Image: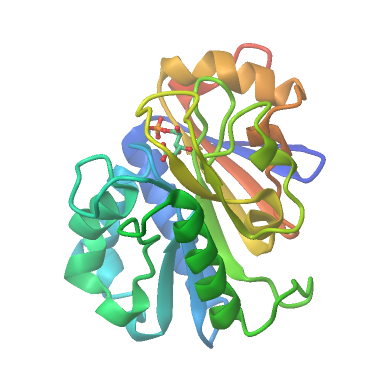
C-alpha cells in the first residue's frame, strides 16, 4: 500500500479493486468505532462503492458494525423511482442496507415528489432536523464519513463542472435539472458545504478509465471533485490501474 500527502488530501493506492474495497470497509468500521454515539454516514452513488457495500454485509464486517446507532444518507440521487435500477439508494439497499440496517436508520432522498426541487427541500429539512440546527458547527460535523466518487468530467455527487449547484453556499441540498453525463435524468445533490461537514471524506476510484480525470484533479484543476474537501480528513482510495502518471505516490 502506497501513501502520499498533498495539502489536506491523502492518496492511498491499493493493488486492485478487491483490496481497495477491503481498505474502504476497514475505514468505515474504524470511523464508526471512533464515535460512541449516533453515527451518520453519507453514501456515494455510481458503481464504485458496490464492492464495499457488499463487503459490509459479510459476516466479518457486519458483526463489527453497531447497526442500531448508525444512520445512512446519500450524497446524491437520480430523480427516478426508488425501484428504478438507476436509483442510487436502491443499489445500497440491495447490497447491504436491507440486510443489515434498521429501516428507520436509512435516509433516502425521496423521488416521489412532484419536482426535484421539492425533493431537495425535503432532504435538506431532514438533514437539518437530524443535525438539530440550521447551520454547521465545525466542532460538530454533520457526518462522520462522506463517501464520494468521481466522474469522467470531474463531477462528484451530482455537482457537475460549471453548474450553479457547485457555487451554492447557503443550501445543503439542491436540485440539478439536467445531468452532464449519463444517466441523463434530473438529480438531487448535497452541496459542497454540506459534504464538507464531516470528519472524513473518502473518495473511491478504480480502473484505468479514471486515470485521465484523476490526473486533472491531482494537478489542481478547478473541478467539483477537486473542490470537495472535508473539514477534517480527505482521503482518496485508488487502485493501481487508476493511478495517473503525473502522480507519484
Ligand atoms: C452518481 C454519482 C456520481 C458517481 C460518479 C462515479 O449518482 O452517478 O453519485 O458522482 O459517484 O459518477 O461513478 P462510478 O462509480 O460509476 O464511476
Q: Position of residue 171 (x, y in %)?
A: 68, 58
Counting the numbered discs, the total is 0
Quadrant field for ligand 1 = top left
In the picture, the quarter occupied by the C terminus is top right
- Which of 172/75 is in front? 172
Q: Position of residue 121 (x, y in %)?
A: 54, 63
Residue at the far front: name it: 114
The answer to whether one can see residue 164 in this image is: yes
Quarter where residue 131 is shown: bottom right
Q: Residue at x 55, y 73 (%)?
A: 125
Q: Residue at x 50, y 77 (%)?
A: 39
- Which scheme is used to colour this image of the protein? rainbow
Q: Is residue 154 left or right of residue 101?
A: right
- Which of 249/21 is in front? 21
The answer to whether one can see residue 76 in this image is: no
Q: Residue at x 58, y 68 (%)?
A: 143
Residue at the far right: name it: 7
Q: Position of residue 150 (x, y in %)?
A: 52, 32
Q: Is residue 39 left or right of residue 81?
A: right
Q: Residue at x 42, y 77 (%)?
A: 70
- Which of 143/10 is in front? 143
Q: Position of residue 199 (x, y in %)?
A: 66, 65
With respect to residue 147, does 215 lie above or below?
Answer: above
Q: Is residue 131 left or right of residue 66?
A: right
Amino acid at each position: 500500500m502506497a501513501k502520499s500527502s498533498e495539502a489536506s488530501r491523502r492518496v492511498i493506492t491499493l493493488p486492485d479493486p478487491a483490496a481497495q474495497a477491503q481498505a474502504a470497509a476497514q475505514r468505515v468500521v474504524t470511523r464508526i468505532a471512533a464515535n460512541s454515539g449516533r453515527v451518520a454516514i453519507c453514501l456515494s452513488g455510481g458503481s464504485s462503492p458496490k464492492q464495499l457495500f457488499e463487503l459490509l454485509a459479510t459476516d466479518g464486517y457486519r458483526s463489527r458494525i453497531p447497526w442500531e446507532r448508525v444512520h445512512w444518507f446519500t450524497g446524491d440521487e437520480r430523480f427516478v423511482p426508488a425501484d428504478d435500477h438507476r436509483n442510487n439508494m436502491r443499489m445500497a439497499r440491495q447490497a447491504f442496507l436491507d440486510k443489515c440496517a434498521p429501516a428507520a436508520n436509512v435516509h433516502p432522498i425521496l423521488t416521489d415528489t412532484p419536482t426535484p426541487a421539492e425533493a431537495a427541500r425535503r432532504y435538506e429539512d431532514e438533514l437539518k432536523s437530524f443535525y438539530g440546527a440550521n447551520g454547521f458547527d465545525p466542532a460538530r460535523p454533520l457526518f462522520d464519513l462522506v463517501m464520494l466518487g468521481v466522474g469522467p468530467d470531474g463531477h462528484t455527487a451530482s455537482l457537475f463542472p460549471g453548474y450553479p449547484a457547485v457555487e451554492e453556499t447557503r443550501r445543503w441540498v439542491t436540485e440539478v435539472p439536467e445531468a452532464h453525463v449519463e444517466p441523463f435524468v434530473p438529480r438531487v445533490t448535497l452541496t459542497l458545504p454540506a459534504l464538507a461537514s464531516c470528519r472524513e471524506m473518502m473518495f473511491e476510484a478504480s480502473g484505468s478509465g479514471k486515470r485521465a480525470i484523476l490526473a486533472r484533479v491531482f494537478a489542481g484543476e478547478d473541478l467539483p471533485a477537486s473542490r470537495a474537501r472535508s473539514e477534517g480528513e480527505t482521503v482518496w482510495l485508488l487502485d493501481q490501474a487508476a493511478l495517473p502518471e503525473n502522480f507519484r505516490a
